[in-house]
Amino acid sequence: MNDSIWTELDKILLKLPFSKENLLKKSKFIQKQDSLGLYLVAIKDVLRRNDIAPLSYIKPTIKEMILHKRKIELIRNIEKIIVKDATKNNNFKIY
């Protein structure tokens, strides 16, 4: 894994043979060796649920939310233009 990145606990548990309790401790260094190799993990900080997430972790989510909002606004504007044009040209049907 990369150095100094925020990641979800579930993703770490899938890749590393550590228990959840060991990873949630704010210890400086965790080491474990098994038949596959040596695992070295450094936990710098642990955030609990409802804590404020770091910007680097939530930035992609915020970007997607902004793009989605812009897309919805664009669709609404296009619909307004189409309705306005149809009423102007009397090219519509009422159901």
Image (cartoon, grey):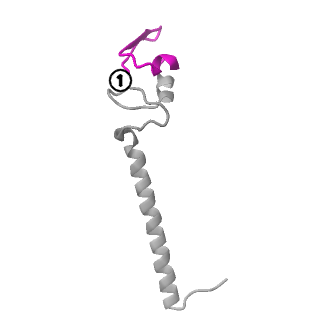
Which residue is disc 1 drawn over? 44
Work out whether residue 18 can be spotted: no
Q: How many marks?
A: 1
Please, which residue is most extreme toward the front here? Answer: 51
Q: Kindly identify the residue that appears in the image at 45 percent across and 66 percent down.
A: 73
Crowdedness near tag 1: few (<14), some (14–19) or many (≥20) residues, C-alpha within 10 Å: few
The disc labelled 1 sits on which kind of residue? Answer: Lys
Looking at the picture, how far across and down is residue 15, in whole percent? 47, 23
Side of 17 where 38 appears, left or right = left
Residue 33 part of the magenta segment: yes
Q: Position of residue 87 (x, y in %)?
A: 52, 88
Where is 17 relative to 75, above or below? above
Of the 4 image quadrants, the one containing the N terminus is top left
Q: Position of residue 58 (x, y in %)?
A: 40, 42
What residue sits 38% from the left and 38% below the top? 57
Magenta region includes residue 39: yes
**Quarter assignment of residue 7:** top left
Which residue is located at x 43 percent, y 68 percent? Answer: 74
Q: Which residues are magenta?
A: 16-43
Q: Is residue 94 left or right of residue 31?
A: right
Q: Quadrant of the C terminus?
A: bottom right
Q: In this image, 14 relative to 26: left or right?
A: right
Q: In the figure, 82 relative to 30: above or below?
A: below
